Amino acid sequence: MKVITTKTAYLQKYYFDILLKSTLVTKVGVPLSICDVVNKRKFDKYDSEDFIKFTKREEIEFLKNATWIPNFYDYIKKPSNEIEKEIELLDNEGNELNKWFQSLSKEERQLKYEYSSTKGKMLMYKKESLNDILAFISNKESRKRFDDRLDNVIYSKPLAFCKKLTRRIKGI
């Protein structure tokens, strides 16, 4: 998931696993400054609760336009049943992708493997993010815990933003 504000973007770090490869599917290049973060840092991709902060305009614009990564603020006010329907659509899209891949010949599979694998991971990560948002909406995850997730020790965010986010969340 991502959290986008006017001057900052936060991205869950497990998206870094697929971010550079996403260009195979989206045909949109990743800004070099994001590539630098991906290539220079060693992340525990399985500790998905941490967020990475981005402040450069091209980074924020890229993340805003990355529709395959759910933005927290786009979903937080949606009813749970709408999010559940979207999760179901993602499952259906994943099943269709799998059927398509299975229908290919062995040679075509070798050529399309990277695309199919990347697209599948993109769907899986989006579903995981929507499940996180759904858990937050249904109060299975406390607001404090969500704030702590944004307050990553690798790239900590400004205290002012934390307070602003807390006020916004309380206003929901």
Image: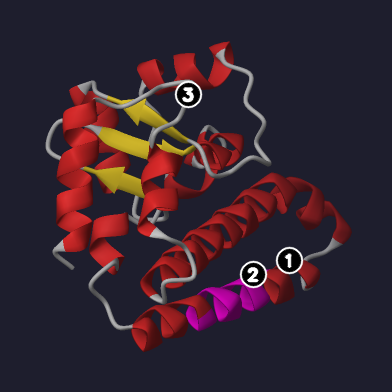
Mark-to-mark CA distance, 3 and 2? 37 Å
Assess whether mark 1 and mark 2 are in contact (beta carbons under 8 angstroms). yes
- Label 3 neighbour load within 10 Å: few <14, some 14-19, many 20+: few
Residue 59's disc number: none
Mark 1 or mark 3, which has the lower sequence index? 1
**Does 107 appear in magenta?**
no
Residue under numbered circle 2: 97
Which residues, given as a range, are shown in magenta?
88-97
- Asked if the magenta segment contains residue 90, the reply would be yes
Q: Please identify the residue farthest to the right as the structure is shown.
A: 106
Q: Which mark, residue 101?
A: 1
Q: Is 15 in front, or is 79?
A: 79
Label 2 amino acid?
Answer: Leu
Q: Amino acid at mark 3?
A: Val
Sequence-wise, the earlier of marks 3 and 2 is 2
Q: Residues within 10 Å of mark 1 (few under 14, many from 20)?
A: some
Label drawn at residue 153:
3
Q: Which residue is located at x 19 percent, y 40 percent? A: 163
- Identify the residue shown where x is 41% and y is 65%: 133
Residue 38 lies left or right of residue 97; in this view the side is left
Residue 24 in percent (x, y) is at: 53, 42
Q: Main secondary structure of the magenta part?
A: helix
Which part of the image, by quadrant, shows the C terminus? bottom left
Give residue 150's quadrant in the image.
top left
**Does 103 appear above or below 129?**
below
Q: Secondary structure at mark 2?
A: helix
Mark 1 secondary-structure assignment:
helix
**How packed is label 2: few (under 14 Cα within 10 Å), some, or many (20 or more)?**
some
Q: SS at mark 3? A: loop
Q: Quadrant of residue 95?
A: bottom right
Residue 171 position in % (x across, y down): 13, 64
Is residue 119 among what the camera can see? yes
